[in-house]
Amino acid sequence: MPDLKIKIKDVLLKNPIIIASGTPTYGLSMVKKCIRSEAAAFVTKTLCYTEWLQKQPRPRWHIEHPGAIDNGGYFSLYSTERLNPTPPDEYVQKMKEYAKEAHDFDVKVIASIAGTDPGTWSKLTDLVTENGADMIELNLQCPHVEKGQLTGMVAGRDPELCYSILQLVRKRTSLPIIGKVVGEGTDPIQIARRMIAGGADAVVITGRFQGLYLNIETEKPIHWGGMGGYGGFWQAPITRKWLVRAAEADLGAPVIGGAGIGAFEDVVSYLLCGAAAVQTCSAAIVYGHKIIKRWLRQISGWMEAKGYDSIADFSGRSVSKIIAPSQIPGDVPYVARIDQNACQKCLRCLEACPYAAISVVEKKLVVDPEKCDGCRLCVALCQQGAAEFFQK
Ligand SMILES: Cc1cc2nc3c(=O)[nH]c(=O)nc-3n(C[C@H](O)[C@H](O)[C@H](O)COP(=O)(O)O)c2cc1C
């Protein structure tokens, strides 16, 4: 069996999968599922002292294209789920108890905190340090925040605020600190760099986005109004991009791949892009915590087939294979052809072809090889697999 262990700072994780803070770590019943899921660690639902952030709007969930969950398509999770409803002082008493059980299963507990001013950042740091957390994660990406507060994406978009919050927390704890980086409205690499300079031992790149759903009849946002957290597996290519940029920037601390994991291939690809570990939330919501066990089996199978004994054998291997835009060749000739047996004559490719290379000849769709540029748009669009593509 390949060895899946990885290390973050001095903490040994039995494999690279961490369950991210959110619904899959909400409340004790979810914590029990995390402990038995075979994930190496989980991040508690974020603790905070702000009363309105502890209250949950009802309803607060919307899923766009839920039918895509089971057929491999893209859906989006939209929610106004706020932070941990249990007051921190009460929650850490439970945390102290379940941390013992987690350790019996070799699962690490990462306490997520969100202060709103220096006082609450300090208080929360002390509280989780003294009550059984193995690591601390600073939630500097939460979308449900008010202007002017020293928390969530409001503070998280400002590199110098991130730096000073990290410094403050660093001074109060010897536990490893993970900074969670916001994915929009700023440069995540610059934020990560300042978090590490302030004392972060690792960073998560990135959380999900902020979005808005409007009901055009009422002309108001759905549910209660306001904006929500917005994400899904479609975030994976964006996360891969940032992971590569982080590897190129050589930040000097482990980077945990965040948003967008929907399959074991995403876990592998994040590691190939230089992630030391990954966090996953949406997949645990839509497939259940049991998905982690399946992914771990699949990752081991992939490693065996590739002849890799450990994560270090392939970690970051794709980074050097990514070339600059100017190096992508512009002169390799390709051409498309249409398989008449498969073509349903929907004309989508004909309409879309920017070279006017596709036309109807004797009731058949044909490609003019002289006009065809080899861009592959017709192949990408064709839902019957009728457009074929080959090098000239
Ligand atoms: C409903 C919901 C609630 C979340 N709550 C938290 C939270 O309390 N603290 C936090 O740091 N992140 C929270 N997140 C963000 C996730 O931890 C994660 O970063 C994000 O969903 C991207 O990962 P994914 O694509 O695997 O879902 C939440 C996400 C969702 C979907």
Image: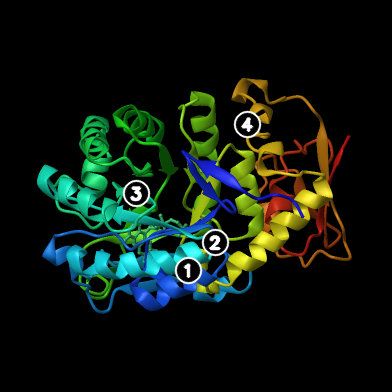
Tell me residue 228's x, y (percent): 29, 62
The mark lying in front, picked from 1 and 4, is 1
Q: Mark 4 vs ligand 1: CB under 8 Å?
A: no
Which of the image's four quarters has the C terminus?
top right
Q: Tags 2 and 1 in contact by the CB under 8 Å rule?
A: yes
The amino acid pointed to by label 1 is Cys
The mark lying in front, picked from 4 and 2, is 2
Q: Which residue is mark 2?
A: 39
**Marks 2 and 3, the one that precedes in the sequence:** 2
**Marks 4 and 3, the one that precedes in the sequence:** 3
Q: Which residue is mark 1?
A: 34
Q: Secondary structure at mark 1?
A: helix
Give the total number of marks visible in the rendering. 4
Q: Residues within 10 Å of mark 2 (few under 14, many from 20)?
A: many
**Disc 2 from disc 3: Cα separation:** 17 Å
Which of the image's four quarters has the N terminus?
bottom right
Q: Secondary structure at mark 4?
A: helix
Q: Quadrant location of ligand 1?
A: bottom left
Q: Secondary structure at mark 2?
A: loop
**Disc 2 from disc 1: Cα separation:** 7 Å
Q: Which residue is mark 3?
A: 137
Would residue 45 appear left or right of 344 to someone viewing this image? left
Q: Residue at x 66, y 43 (%)?
A: 311
Dividing the picture into quadrants, the one containing residue 322 is: top right
Closest to the observer: 65 or 144? Answer: 144
Task: State whether residue 310 is above or below residue 296.
Answer: above
Q: Which residue is mark 4?
A: 319
Would residue 123 appear left or right of 33 to someone viewing this image? left
Q: Tags 4 and 3 in contact by the CB under 8 Å rule?
A: no
Q: Residue at x 28, y 46 (%)?
A: 140
